[in-house]
């Protein structure tokens, strides 16, 4: 996980000395990451951006530099209403219904989706 976060962070802040990282650098990156592209889609979700900021925070804490800027860095708000897990009874109904479907690919897709935690 940290390697993926570091890959992005390195692209954005890699040209700076660790002592030169300012809150405005982090804020500008946050804004750029959640900005919409030409198709109206964000480049990254707020949760992803927060994970990247947490990686920056961990590195700066390790070098005792976070305390100087930490109060000026804000995490992005994250939605917590994204859904809930299916109950076993709901899963069973979903399996049975998809198995009865005329579509031959629906049942394997449902099994794959439920076993891998796929989202909408």
Image (cartoon, rainbow, N blue to C red):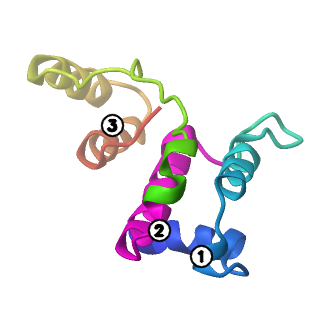
At 55% from the left and 49% from the top, the residue drawn is 49
Residue 19 marker = 1
The residue where tag 2 is placed is 65
Q: In this view of the protein, which residue sits in the foreground, 110 or 25? A: 25
Whether 77 is drawn above or below 50: the answer is above
Secondary structure mostly seen in magenta is helix
Q: In this view, does 24 lie to the left or right of 66?
A: right
Residue 110 marker = 3
Going from N to C along the chain, the mark reached first, 2 or 1, is: 1
At 50% from the left and 66% from the top, the residue drawn is 5
Judged from the image, the secondary structure of the residue bearing numbered disc 1 is: helix
Judged from the image, the secondary structure of the residue bearing numbered disc 3 is: helix
Compute the Cα span from label 3 to label 1: 50 Å
Judged from the image, the secondary structure of the residue bearing numbered disc 2 is: loop
Q: Mark 3 against mark 1, which lies toward the viewer? A: 1
Going from N to C along the chain, the mark reached first, 3 or 1, is: 1
Q: Is residue 52 left or right of residue 84?
A: right
Compute the Cα span from label 2 to label 1: 7 Å
Going from N to C along the chain, the mark reached first, 3 or 2, is: 2
Q: Is residue 64 left or right of residue 100?
A: right
Q: Position of residue 81 (x, y in %)?
A: 40, 18
Compute the Cα span from label 3 to label 2: 48 Å
Q: In this view of the protein, which residue sits in the foreground, 46 or 93? A: 46
At 44% from the left and 75% from the top, the residue drawn is 3
Q: Position of residue 98 (x, y in %)?
A: 31, 27
Report crowding for label 2: few under 14, some 14 to 19, many 20 or more residues within 10 A (C-alpha): some
**Residue 78 within the segment the image draws in magenta:** no
Q: Give the range drawn in magenta.
A: 44-66
Q: Where is residue 101 in the image (x, y as percent from the top left)?
A: 36, 25
Look at the image and tell me in which quarter the N terminus lies: bottom left
At 66% from the left and 47% from the top, the residue drawn is 30
- Asked whether the residues under the numbered discs 3 and 2 touch, taking CB atoms below 8 Å apart as contact, a structural biologist would say no
């Amino acid at each position: 996980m940290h390697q993926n976060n570091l890959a992005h962070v390195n692209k954005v802040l890699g040209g700076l000395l660790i002592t030169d990282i300012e809150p405005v650098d982090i804020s500008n990156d946050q804004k750029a990451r959640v900005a919409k592209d030409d198709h109206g889609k964000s480049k990254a979700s707020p949760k992803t951006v927060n994970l990247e900021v947490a990686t920056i925070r961990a590195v700066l804490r390790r070098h005792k530099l976070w305390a100087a800027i930490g109060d000026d860095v804000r995490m992005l708000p994250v939605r917590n209403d994204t859904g809930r897990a299916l109950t076993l009874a709901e899963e069973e109904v979903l399996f049975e219904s998809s198995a009865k479907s005329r579509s031959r690919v629906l049942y394997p897709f449902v099994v794959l989706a439920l076993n891998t935690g796929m989202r909408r």
